[in-house]
Amino acid sequence: MMGPRERVMMRLGIIGGTGLVSMNLDERFGEVGIRVVRKDSISVSTPYGSVPLTCISLDDQGVEKELIFLQRHHNESGHGCPPHQINHRANMMAMNDAQIDGIMAVCSVGSLDVSFPPGKVALAEQYIDFTGVESTFHDDESVFTSVTEPFDLSMNEQLDTALRESQGFDAGEKMGYTYWLSQGPQFETRAEVDAIGLLGGHMVGMTMPREAKLARELDLPYSAVCISSNWAAGREPGDETKALDHEEVSAQANDRLEPIWACLVSLLS
């Protein structure tokens, strides 16, 4: 039985990046009685540019449901468009036009927090964006959107349960963290990471808050599931000078997808 705030997504949007490069669901969903009926790759035109989407039709024990998957880098390898060049307005408008019920974004992050070691999957509950780069649909008029709670609280509550159960965490495990937006495409210096920690950042990445802002302007429920793929610069135990490598980060993120599938199943069924 669903809790009082839980809801089932009939059309769920999924955004992946380095931490989720493709959607190979047949075997994963078959274990819980969800069958992939059809998968179509389409290109959606928006006023901001075209966006490739994968539309996946599902049969959940006789009930039709849809997954709309967007690879934010527009490349199945996760090494396509660099983070500072992503057309977030086109991406989010394409998702909005797909008439989805909500978005679950999957993000690979570097961790500053000892309670968020590489391999753990958790949630963003706040973000900090001091990049000075705007992310809005309102260039020609003054529209001030509240982002006091930037992520959908109902979705986060539901995902929190799924992540705890799938990873064997008890009620005392910390599951909500603050995402620090870095401009990129370079990784951070040790000094920058130290400053980020002092200012309240628990994890660092280069994309997600831009999506969250646009989702809030579109009134789209949005949650971010974050895979700790590596220690942030200078935080590697025993080797504070260890260099960060994108290929290594991507490989670690895509080895930790079981909790992601649990989240999808929770939202869908």
Image: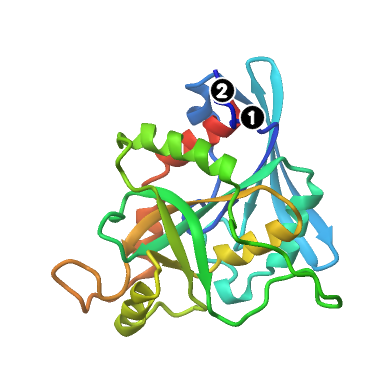
The answer to whether residue 221 is above or below residue 59 is below
Is residue 253 found left or right of 128 in the rendered image? left
Compare residues 28 and 40 and report the one nearer the observer.
28
Task: Tell me if mark 2 has few (under 14), some (14-19) or many (20+) residues whose alpha carbon lies within 10 angstroms of its own.
Answer: few
Q: Identify residue type, mark 2.
A: Met
Q: Residue at x 41, y 57 (%)?
A: 177
- On the image, the x and y values in percent for residue 4 come to 58, 27
Q: Identify residue type, mark 1.
A: Val
Query: Seen from this angle, which residue lies furthest top?
Result: 62
Q: Residue at x 49, y 28 (%)?
A: 27
CB of mark 1 within 8 Å of CB of mark 2? Answer: yes
Is residue 64 found left or right of 129 in the rendered image? right
- On the image, the x and y values in percent for residue 58 come to 66, 28
Residue underneath mark 1: 8
- On the image, the x and y values in percent for residue 56 come to 68, 36
Compare residues 123 and 3 and report the one nearer the observer.
3
Compare residues 216 and 43 and report the one nearer the observer.
216
> Which of the numbered marks, if any, corresponds to residue 2?
2
Give the number of marks: 2
Element at label 2:
loop
Q: Residue at x 27, y 54 (%)?
A: 115
The answer to which quarter of the image holds residue 197 is bottom left
The answer to which quarter of the image holds residue 241 is bottom left
Q: Quadrant of the N terminus?
A: top right
